[in-house]
Image: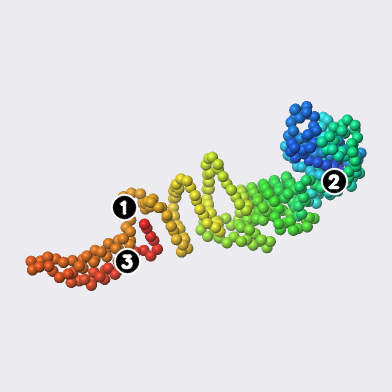
Amino acid sequence: MAELSSPQSAAAQSAQTAGSGAPKGFGIVYSIILDETHEYIKHVGDKDLEFFGETSYIGAVQYRLVGQPSSDDASLPVAFPFDKNFKTLPLINESVEIFQNGGTSYYKRIGQEKTPNVDAKKTIISETFPPTQIPEDKNTSYKTTAETNTPKTNVKESSKYDKYGNYFEGEAGIHKLKLYEGDSLIETRFGQSIRFSGYNNSQKIFSPTTIIRNSENAESKKKELKVSTEEDINRDGSIIVLSSNQYQLPFQPGTVDDKGSTDFETKPNTFKAYPSKLIGDQILINSGRIILSAKNAEMIFYSKKNYGFISDGSLSIDNKLGVDVNVGDSTNYNTNDRDINLNTGNGKINLGNTKLEPLVKGDAWVSLMEELIDAIVQQVFLTPAGPSATGPTNVPKFNTIKSKLKSVLSELNKTS
C-alpha cells in the first residue's frame, strides 16, 4: 500500500473510507459557538431551532475555505465537530479540514504543531484573506445579506480577527509528550493528557499503564519546545497512575524541587514491610489536596496487607458517632515524650469489661492517709487511771510513713 503524501490526505482518505463524506477543503476558523448565546444562533431559522434546538450548534465553528472569495462575515458557513462524542475545539485563526455529508459540513483539527497549546498565528485570517465588507449594524447583518447579497455599509479590516478567542491566550511552555510504541494518547492544549501505554517502563516490558495528568509542571515548561516531555508523577499538578507489572513508580512524597529533593520529613519507621519497589498492579493519586467523599453511603477500605498513614502534620478524626476498633495483636503507642490525653468530660474510662472497679484518685488517697496518720498519732485512750498520754510511743515511725505517702503517686499519669 502506497504511503500517503501528507497528514491532510490521510485524514481525507480516512473520512472517505468511514463513509463520512468527501473532504470539502481546508478552512480557517473565524468563530466558535461555545453556548446558546452565540450571535449566529440568533439568526438561525425558526424551523431549524424548533427541530434541533439551540444547543445542537454548541461546538460548531464558523469558517472560510482557503481559496474562497472574500464575502460578508455574516454569511460564513458553519461546520460541526467530526466526532460528536469527543470534541476538541479549534481556535480563531486555526486550520481545520472540512467534510461534507448530506448537506452538512463537519470539521477536524489538522496541521503540524510544535506545542499542543496553539498551532496557528494570530494573523492567519488577515494575511490569508483581503479586507472584507461587513455590515455596521450587526443586528440586521444576516437579514441584509440574505435579501441583497451585498454588505450594507462601510469597509472594515479583517485584522479584527487577529486573536485566538475572546479570552484565550497562548500558554508558553506546553510540550508534546514523548510517545512509546503502540501508545494511545489524548492530549489537550493545556497540559492535560491521558496516556494508554504498554511499554513506558525502563525495561520496555509489556506492562499496561494508564496515566491521567491535569497539568504540566513548571520545571518541564522551562524546556525548549523542540524537545518532548513526559509525565512527572511527583511534580505535575495532579496525576493518577494505574500501572502494572514492571512499571515502577518513581514516587516521592511532598513537594519535589528541581534537583529532585523533597520537603517531606517523616519516614515510615513503624510501617512493617514497606515496599522497596513500587511495581505491580497499583494506583497512585498525587495532588496538592485530595478529597474523598461518600455523600450518602459507606466509605470502605480493604487491605490484604499492612496499611499506614505517614504525614508531616497531625491526624484528627471528627465523628458524630463513636469509634469501634477490633484488633488481633498488640496496640503500641510511642509518643516520643509527648502526652496522651483522654478528655472524656463526664464520660467514663473503663479498663477491661468484667468486674469493673473504680480507680483510686492518688491525691485524694494521700490526703486521706495523712488524715488517718494524724488521727493515729493524736489518739488518747481512756484507762481506769484516767486518759492516757496523747499518741502512741512510736509517733516518729508514723510520721516517717506519712512523709513517704506521695511516693506512690505517678509522676506522668493522671486521672480525674
Q: Percent from the top left, x then y, of residue 153?
A: 90, 38
Write down the residue under mark 1.
357
Q: CA distance from mark 1 to mark 3?
A: 23 Å
Front position in the image: 40 or 221: 40
The residue indicated by pointer 3 is: 406
Marks 1 and 2, how far apart at CA:
88 Å
x then y, percent, for residue 223: 76, 58
Tally of marks = 3
The answer to which quarter of the image holds residue 395 is: bottom left
Against 384, residue 46 (above or below) is above
**Going by the image, does 137 lie left or right of 412?**
right
Looking at the rendered structure, the secondary structure element under dot 3 is helix
Q: Residues within 10 Å of mark 3 (few under 14, many from 20)?
A: some
> Residues at badges 1 and 2 in contact (C-beta under 8 Å)?
no
Residue 413 visible at all: yes
The tag on residue 255 is none
The dot on residue 160 is 2
The quarter in which the C terminus is drawn is bottom left
Q: CA distance from mark 3 to mark 2?
A: 91 Å
Q: Quadrant of the N terminus?
A: top right
